[in-house]
Amino acid sequence: MAESSSISNPDANSNLSRKRRKIEPKTPAGAPTETGRPRWQNDVEQQIYSLKLVDALCHLRRPDSAAATSRAVRNAADQVLAVSARGKTRWSRAILTGRLSLRLAHINKKHKKAAKRAAVGESRTKKPAVQKKLPPLEKKVKVLSRLVPGCRKVSLPNLLEETTDYIAALEMQVKAMTFLTGLLNGAVSSSAAAGGDSSLADRG
Amino acid sequence: MSSRRSRSRQSSGASRISDDQIADLVSRLQQLIPEIRNRRSDKVSASKVLQETCNYIRSLHREVDDLSDRLSELLESTDSDSAQAAIIRSLLM
């Protein structure tokens, strides 16, 4: 469908395809900083997240190769969370891109460390420890930046904004996962009783 | 406060942020952290807020890890179809 419309409008072709991709970030969340909290505290958002998470988890089980390890579940949960953020926050983008380049990052780190060790001897004389006296506040900011994914070199106000969004998202993640755990607990206990329920699970 | 301003000026190479901005963001952070919310929210220093934030994020991470542990165990014992059915049913009701 998109192709036929783009053929009829050759001039607007590129615009159409660009508009399509850019429509999502242009959604009426004009002030993302303000709607950060209500966005994650929305019940609907939580339900959507639960559904997506279950879907991702079921995909995990299909191959049956590595089963559902706790690490895999955690990663799936983080991924779905990051996707729900719709690319508006730094930490979500970091989670999504971190997976793809995980191995590359490991290799790069090793190379960088080796290069750093070689260069440290020179740099020590050039930079005479200007920031040796890190105020304790800065230290905490550093720790915080390490906790929030993808925010190690981010300025302070951005870091604080990312943190507020990240905390709200994490809370929703905990709520949704608690909810799922409770449900599955019930499902496990009642699966023996209601053996014929599998016929109802029509994925429409 | 004046000492903070002089500090921020010295290290303002990368950041020309006003004190008020930081104070505003810190107070917003304050609202999110349950520990600080339950106490008096007026007299909490920025350093305390940051500390509590880090602790809170770490505890949330731990909770997620715990939950994913439990979820992985539960998933192994149920089959995906009945799990999905249960969830969709509960969400529709």
Image (spheres, helix red, strand yellow):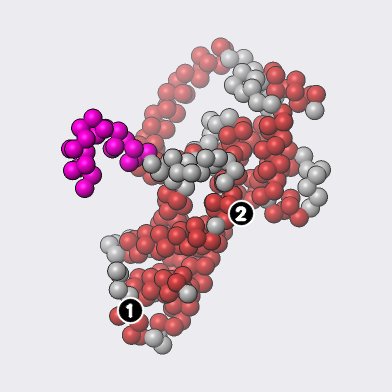
Q: Is residue A87 left or right of residue B44?
A: left
Q: Which chain does the residue under circle 1 lie in?
A: A
Q: Are marks 2 and 1 in contact (CB under 8 Å)?
A: no
Q: Is residue A94 left or right of residue A2?
A: right
Residue B48 visible to the viewer: yes
The residue sitting at 49% across, 39% down in the picture is A90
Q: In terms of depth relative to the viewer, which is nearer, B33 or A68? A: B33
User: As shown in the figure, which amino acid type bears the numbered disc 1?
Assistant: Leu
Residue A200's disc number: 1
User: As shown in the figure, which amino acid type bears the numbered disc 2?
Assistant: Ser
Secondary element type, mark 1? helix
Quarter residue A126 falls in: top right
Q: In terms of depth relative to the viewer, which is nearer, A13 or B66? A: A13
Q: How many marks?
A: 2
Q: Is residue A142 left or right of residue A102?
A: right
- Determine which residue is flagged by label 2: B59
The residue sitting at 62% across, 23% down in the picture is B15
